[in-house]
């Protein structure tokens, strides 16, 4: 009798924007896109973060090591006042001139969970940065606040809740920020670092799971990103992060007021975009993936750039398909 389900479901639909991006023509879309991007900046407080924490960027190589015969440089980057963070450069032996900003997902090892061979349950990255380097891609990968070496010291590593998302999220939320917004800011500062180090090329952003959330929002917010891959994330909020427990970093106050997850992804158009999910992914299930992919197909078709969007469901769970990703990159990144 007193269940909140019906009330919350009514809010879900009631407070989203009346205008749906898939219903707009090209001129209307561009106007609405501009409005929502500005609101997204305000929601993530990117101007305030910039004002509070931007500083002259300095950096140095902290370490160099080898995995799968690929050389990896670890940079210590000082770009955020009071918070240094590592950025890894996975270096191809035979560069093809194409560069990728790789955004990792949840892993108690942080970015190292994507660079080392793993046999435990956290293995969905499948060492993809190294496999991309084997194909000739330069891969740049920051380690996000709350994960790996950037965990919160009072919370031991070893489980998702203890990895550092929760304490960092709690601190930032009480201060009026969000860990989701801060990670977008951190990705922007990573691009600034790359520019400072002499890399002015436009990049492809490739985000997996939690990194997919960051990639989803970085795509429309930064013009230095030319193309995007969002893996293990594109869905509806109702089918995914509101349907079961997910990490606190997914819940940014007010985000749903700007549109569902697929509407946020639609803001990337007309940039080239590849969304790829597993058919058996329990956190981002097939039904929600299909809704999101169909919506994005309609948006890109309305803009006359259907060829710039591909959505694919692969066999598997919360994981990537290396061959599908490499094939898309080789055919779409010029």
Image (tube, rainbow, N blue to C red):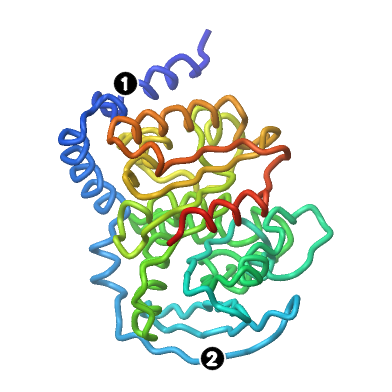
Badge 1 density bin: few <14, some 14–19, many ≥20, Cα 10 Å: few
Nearer the camera: disc 1 or disc 2: 2
- Left or right: 113 in relation to 223: right
User: For the point 50% across and 77% down, which residue is it?
Assistant: 85
Q: Quadrant of residue 90?
A: bottom right
User: For the point 74% across and 61% down, which residue is it?
Assistant: 158
Badge 2 density bin: few <14, some 14–19, many ≥20, Cα 10 Å: few
Residue found farthest to the top: 1
- Left or right: 183 in relation to 116: left
Which residue does the numbered mark 1 point to in the structure image?
14
- Left or right: 219 in relation to 288: left
Q: Quadrant of residue 61?
A: bottom right
Residue found farthest to the right: 119
Evaluate if marks 1 and 2 touch, with contact meaning CB atoms under 8 Å apart. no
- Could you say where residue 4 lies in the image, as x and y percent from the top left? 48, 19
User: Helix, strand or loop at disc 2?
Assistant: strand
**Relative to the observer, which residue lies in front, 175 or 260?**
260
Q: Quadrant of residue 181?
A: bottom left
- Could you say where residue 73 lies in the image, as x and y percent from the top left? 59, 85
Label 1 vs 2, first from the N-terminus? 1
User: For the point 40% across and 54% down, which residue is it?
Assistant: 173
**Whole-Å distance between the Cαs marked 1 and 2?**
50 Å
The disc at residue 61 is 2
User: For the point 41% across and 55% down, which residue is it?
Assistant: 227
Image: 262 above or below 15:
below
User: Helix, strand or loop at disc 1?
Assistant: helix
């Amino acid at each position: 009798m007193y269940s909140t389900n019906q009330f919350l479901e009514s809010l879900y639909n009631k407070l989203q924007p009346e205008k749906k991006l898939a219903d707009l023509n090209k001129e209307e879309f561009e106007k609405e896109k501009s409005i929502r991007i500005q609101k997204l900046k305000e929601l993530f407080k990117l101007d305030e973060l910039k004002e509070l924490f931007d500083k002259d960027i300095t950096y140095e190589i902290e370490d160099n090591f080898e995995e799968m015969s690929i050389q990896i440089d670890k940079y210590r980057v000082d770009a955020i006042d009071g918070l240094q963070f590592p950025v890894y450069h996975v270096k191809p032996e035979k560069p093809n001139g194409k560069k990728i900003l790789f955004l990792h997902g949840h892993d108690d090892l942080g970015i190292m969970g994507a660079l080392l061979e793993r046999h435990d349950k956290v293995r969905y990255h499948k060492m993809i940065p190294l496999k991309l380097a084997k194909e000739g891609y330069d891969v740049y990968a920051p380690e996000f606040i709350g994960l790996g070496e950037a965990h919160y010291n009072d919370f031991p590593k070893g489980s998702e809740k203890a990895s550092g998302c929760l304490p960092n999220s709690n601190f930032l939320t009480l201060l009026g920020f969000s860990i989701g917004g801060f990670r977008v800011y951190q990705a922007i500062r990573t691009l600034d670092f790359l520019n400072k180090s002499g890399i002015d090329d436009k990049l492809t952003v490739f985000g997996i799971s939690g990194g997919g959330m960051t990639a989803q929002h970085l795509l429309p917010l930064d013009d230095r990103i030319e193309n995007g891959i969002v893996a293990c994330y594109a869905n509806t909020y109702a089918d995914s992060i509101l349907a079961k427990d997910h990490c606190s970093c997914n819940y940014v106050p007010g985000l749903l007021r700007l549109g569902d997850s697929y509407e946020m992804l639609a803001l990337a158009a007309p940039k080239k975009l590849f969304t790829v999910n597993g058919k058996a992914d329990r956190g981002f299930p097939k039904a929600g993936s299909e809704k999101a992919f169909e919506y994005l197909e309609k948006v890109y078709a309305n803009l006359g750039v259907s060829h710039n969007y591909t959505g694919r469901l692969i066999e598997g769970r919360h994981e990537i398909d290396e061959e599908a990703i490499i094939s898309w990159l080789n055919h779409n990144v010029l």
